[in-house]
Amino acid sequence: MKIVYLVGSASASSINRQLANTLVELAPEGVEMVEAEIKDLPHYNRDYDAAYPEVAVKFKELLASADGVLFITPEHNRMFSALLHNAIEWSSRPWGQWSLAGKPVAVTGAAPSGVGTALAQSHLRSTLLFFDPKLMTQPEAYIDATRTGQLEDGVITNETSREIIANFIAAFAQFIEDNK
């Protein structure tokens, strides 16, 4: 099974990058986790529809090859990041060629707050529904990096957080299997 994941932060030291590293580490056996690099996608505009840049073609091909897609979002001003928004734009163009239609998707994220990325995740889920994916709604995973998301060596080491993350990625893998 191949899960393609998108990290909504371009920062190398992002807590969401570390969440992604932890998800990769804790993925069930037989699950291949592949990152879709999105920081180099140009800002989408419809002028590209006639001739997609190579980076966007490869991005759409990677999404097409996925059994499921995982969005890992920071929370920027109570919503998901512009970086993820741009990637979603590319995934949905040209009009009607939606890379996420019918595909199992899930959302998680980490933030230094008591509510994790609850608002950003809610906003992202409602946006994704327009593209008709199979959206996993439970379990949810809101990682509060101030209490349970202690970071070390690029991964989350707090056992409570690791259990939440392991359960989340296992549930997503099962969701993908159930929605083939």
Image (cartoon, helix red, strand yellow):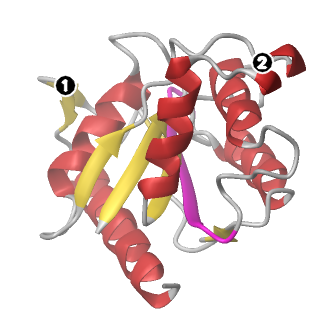
How would you rate the neighbour count of disc 2 (Cα within 10 Å): few for under 14, some for 14-19, many for 20 or more? Answer: some
Q: Quadrant of residue 43?
A: top right
Q: Across the whole image, how many numbered discs are drawn on residues?
A: 2
Callout 2 touching callout 1 (CB < 8 Å): no
Foreground of the two, 71 or 97: 97
Front in this rendered view, residue 52 or 24: 52
**Between 25 and 51, the one nearer to me in the picture:** 51
Q: Considering only vertical position in the picture, is 119 above or below 10?
A: below
Residue 118, x across and y down, in percent: 67, 46
Q: Amino acid at mark 2?
A: Tyr
Q: Measured from the top left, where is residue 138 in percent x and y?
A: 57, 74
Quadrant in the picture for residue 146? top left
- Checking the image for residue 48, the label placed there is 2
**Quadrant holding the N terminus:** bottom left
Labelled disc at residue 117: none
Q: Is residue 3 left or right of residue 133?
A: left
Residue 52 in which image quadrant: top right
Q: Secondary structure at mark 1?
A: loop
Q: Which residues are magenta?
A: 102-113
Could you say where residue 27 lies in the image, as x and y percent from the top left? 22, 60
